[in-house]
Amino acid sequence: MTHCLLHCMGAAEAVILTPKPMSLISAYCGGLWLAAVAVMVQMAAVCGAQDIQDKFSSILSRGQEAYERLLWNGRYYNYDSSSQPQSRSVMSDQCAGQWFLKACGLGEGDTEVFPTPHVVRALQTIFELNVQAFAGGAMGAVNGMQPHGVPDKSSVQSDEVWVGVVYGLAATMIQEGLTWEGFQTAEGCYRTVWERLGLAFQTPEAYCQQRVFRSLAYMRPLSIWAMQLALQQQQHKKASRPKVEQDTGLRTGPMFGPKEAMQT
């Protein structure tokens, strides 16, 4: 069963980022797989299928343990669990599973899959290396960055910036409370595409630091709307928190300013 788990958590390597192959468990494919299993658990609960819920809860628990043990290094999730030179590359899209979970209203509290401190630390590392250490922090997040701050050039795609991936990354940052970092990350793509490349409504799939781009009018950059969703979710979360008085710590009713208080 353990071998099956490991295989599934890296199974998408044949169709995802093929020029930059992944081996064994990968942060990207494994994270997406765990997120899908977590959603399966919730679907089974809604349908009242206790046996299926128990089955996938067990799979999820073992998968989480393997994922954290084999990939987490204290700063981010390794690219994959192999011994290849690029296995410790910092992948900008490593938290994609968490992004999708949070977009579905899951991924925290009782439905947490990836430890929140690990997710936040990984996003901070991505911002530090893939964003700020790349092109002066002005072109978004490069797909792959080596731990010492040099772009990963092990494949034709690893040193590209994928606009849709960057907007998804920005949304993930906003979801986790890193709003400023999220907008700084997205701004690099916006200014590169609109102001430096002059592509306006022909947003490409990818571009490089040398301003080489490909696949105009690509659909993936529509993920920019995920930033809007993340902001709305954050606003809703803040609005639903009970208001408290600082001096007593007790829950109160509507909060009034001086002028409104005089009129009540």
Image (tube, grey):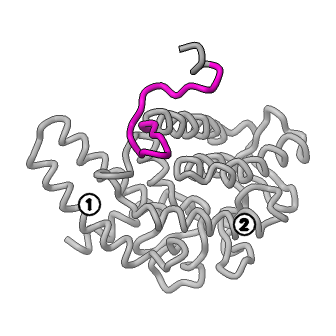
Is the stretch drawn in magenta largely helix, strand or loop?
A: loop
The three-letter amino acid code for the residue at tag 2 is Asp
Q: Nearer the viewer, residue 236 or 167?
A: 236
- Where disc 1 sits, the SS reads helix
Q: Could you tell me residue 53's position as x and y percent?
A: 16, 49
Q: Could you tell me residue 141's position as x and y percent?
A: 70, 59
The three-letter amino acid code for the residue at tag 1 is Leu
Q: Could you tell me residue 26's position as x and y percent?
A: 46, 69
**How many numbered marks, from 0 up?**
2
Tell me if mark 1 has few (under 14), some (14-19) or many (20+) residues whose alpha carbon lies within 10 angstroms of its own. Answer: many
Q: Residue 47 shows which numbered tag?
A: none
Which residue is at 49% across, 62% downward? 119
Residue at image mark 1: 60
In the rendered image of this protein, does residue 201 appear above or below residue 105? above
- Where disc 2 sits, the SS reads loop
Which residue is at 20% across, 36% downward? 46
Q: Could you tell whether 242 is left or right of 53 in the image? A: right
Residue at image mark 2: 159
- Quarter of the image for residue 146 reads bottom right
Question: Is 253 contained in the magenta span?
Answer: yes
Question: Is 176 contained in the magenta span?
Answer: no
Q: Nearer the viewer, residue 111 or 59?
A: 111
- Quarter of the image for residue 155 reads bottom right
Tell me if mark 2 has few (under 14), some (14-19) or many (20+) residues whose alpha carbon lies within 10 angstroms of its own. Answer: many
Q: Could you tell whether 41 is left or right of 206 in the image? A: left
Residue stretch in magenta: 241-259
